[in-house]
Image (tube, rainbow, N blue to C red):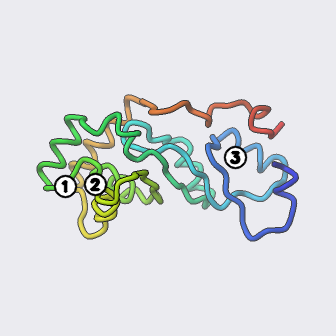
Amino acid sequence: MTTLMRTSRKSLGVSNFGVIHLEALAKLGLEKPSVNQIQINPWYQNRDIVKYCREHDITVIGYSPLAKAKKIDDETVAEIAKKLSKSPAQILIRWSVQHGFITIPKTSQESRLTTNANVFDWAIPDEDMKTLDALGEQQWSCTWDPTMSSLEEAGLN
């Protein structure tokens, strides 16, 4: 990876880089990435990585905004969805959008694709955003957490 970063190109993006990995790039004298794609949803907010990325002008792309549908029936999300006349998926995607993340939900159904895209002409009220943000105290990941891998595993030693 470090060899690739030393070659000419317009920009570079990384995926699943934790703060330790991003700091290692800087210590190696390598260009900072333009984007870092990480898991982001109300239950797994990666606050330390998001803070670092924002402080260093690295765009955050969030995957698994729907937590792989494992939390789609969450009571808190369902209550907010009902109150706003939206689907739980729309609430979760809009949560990411309101936090300024580029979000990449996955679906194989055309009808869900259309519904999932309808999140830009409304907003979740601040009080409900705080309620959703509080879900992050659980730090529940829907997948393994590669941001915790060693520098050696990431090829940055």
Establish if 148 lies above or below 9: above
Give amino acid for label 3. Answer: Leu
Between discs 3 and 1, the one toward the N terminus? 3
Question: What residue would you read off at disc 2?
Answer: 90
Q: Residue furthest front?
A: 109
Image location of residue 131, percent across then percent down:
25, 42
Q: Residues within 10 Å of mark 2 (few under 14, many from 20)?
A: many
Measured in 3D between alpha carbons, the distance from the residue under mark 2 to the one under mark 1, in whole angstroms, is 6 Å
Question: What residue would you read off at disc 3?
Answer: 22
Q: Are marks 2 and 1 in contact (CB under 8 Å)?
A: yes
Q: Is residue 38 left or right of residue 87?
A: right
Q: Say which element carries label 3.
A: helix
* Res. 33 image quadrant: bottom right
Image location of residue 31, percent across then percent down:
78, 59
Q: Residue at x 76, y 43 (%)?
A: 24
Q: Is residue 112 left or right of residue 59?
A: left
Q: Residue at x 44, y 37 (%)?
A: 44
* Res. 19 image quadrant: top right
Measured in 3D between alpha carbons, the distance from the residue under mark 2 to the one under mark 3, in whole angstroms, is 31 Å
Q: Residue at x 55, y 46 (%)?
A: 38
Q: Residues within 10 Å of mark 1 (few under 14, many from 20)?
A: some
Question: What residue would you read off at disc 1?
Answer: 86
